[in-house]
Image (cartoon, rainbow, N blue to C red):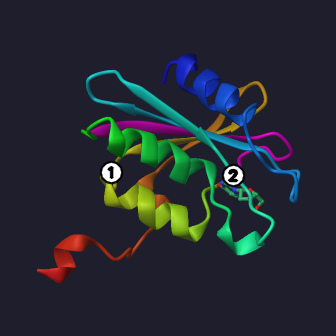
Amino acid sequence: MSHDLFLAAKAAMAKAYAPYSKFPVGAALRTGDGRVFAGANIEVASYPEGWCAETTALGHYVMAGGGKITEIAVVAERMARCTPCGGCRQRLAEFTQPETRLYLCDETGVVETVTMGEMLPYGFRGDMLK
Ligand code: THU
């Protein structure tokens, strides 16, 4: 992957609103046609109402028209290789393929590359509803 996706995730992390956990997270995804959408976690005083960086990025992506997602980067200020939570794995799986690459980062760049299939094996998918 190119370093720019990590940089987009890191720049998004700087915009995190995480006054309660003090655990800023940034996520960025790239589409097949080269667009990049990024997001940060946004917390709320009623804690369960906050949401994750991955979810913010997906919101930007959907509102811009969606498309094929080719790669995703996640970075957290206080943790190397922060992996998406269970809910975000399910949300990311909605718009990706099992082979879509997910880059786990530290503050300097990519530390580990995994696939969505590895992140969410045996996941529930929309085609099961047909
Ligand atoms: N968080 C994310 O934004 N993404 C992750 O992948 C893991 C956790 C956020 C949620 C909450 O604002 C904070 O990190 C601590 O759980």
Locate residue 122: give its quadrant. Answer: bottom left
x 34%, y 77%: residue? 124
Please tell me whether residue 125 is drawn above or below residue 97 in the rendered image: below
Q: Which mark is residue 88?
A: none
Please, what secondary structure does the residue beneath circle 2 have?
loop
Q: From the viewer's perspective, is 110 left or right of 34?
A: right
Question: Residue 11: where, in percent of width, then height?
Answer: 68, 25
Measuring from the top left, give residue 117's x and y in whole percent.
40, 60
In the rendered structure, which segment of residues is drawn in magenta? 68-82
Residue at the image point whose x is 71% and y is 46% from the top: 81
Given the current orientation, which residue lies at the most extreme front position?
45
- Quadrant for the C terminus, please: bottom left
| Residue 90: image location, x then y, percent | 44, 67
| The CB of the residue at mark 2 lies under 8 Å from ligand 1 | yes
Q: Amino acid at mark 1?
A: Thr
Identify the residue shown where x is 75% and y is 62%. 44
Q: Which residue is mark 1?
A: 96
Q: Position of residue 106 (x, y in %)?
A: 75, 35
Q: Amino acid at mark 2?
A: Ile
Instruction: Name the quarter showing ligand 1.
Output: bottom right
The residue that disc 2 covers is 42
Marks 1 and 2: CB-CB under 8 Å?
no
**85 relative position to 95: left or right:** right
The residue nearer to you, when weighing 94 against 123, is: 94
Q: Residue furthest left?
A: 130
Q: Specify whether 115 is left or right of 18.
A: left
Q: Is residue 54 part of the magenta span, yes or no?
A: no
The mark lying in front, picked from 1 and 2, is 2
Q: Residues within 10 Å of mark 2 (few under 14, many from 20)?
A: some
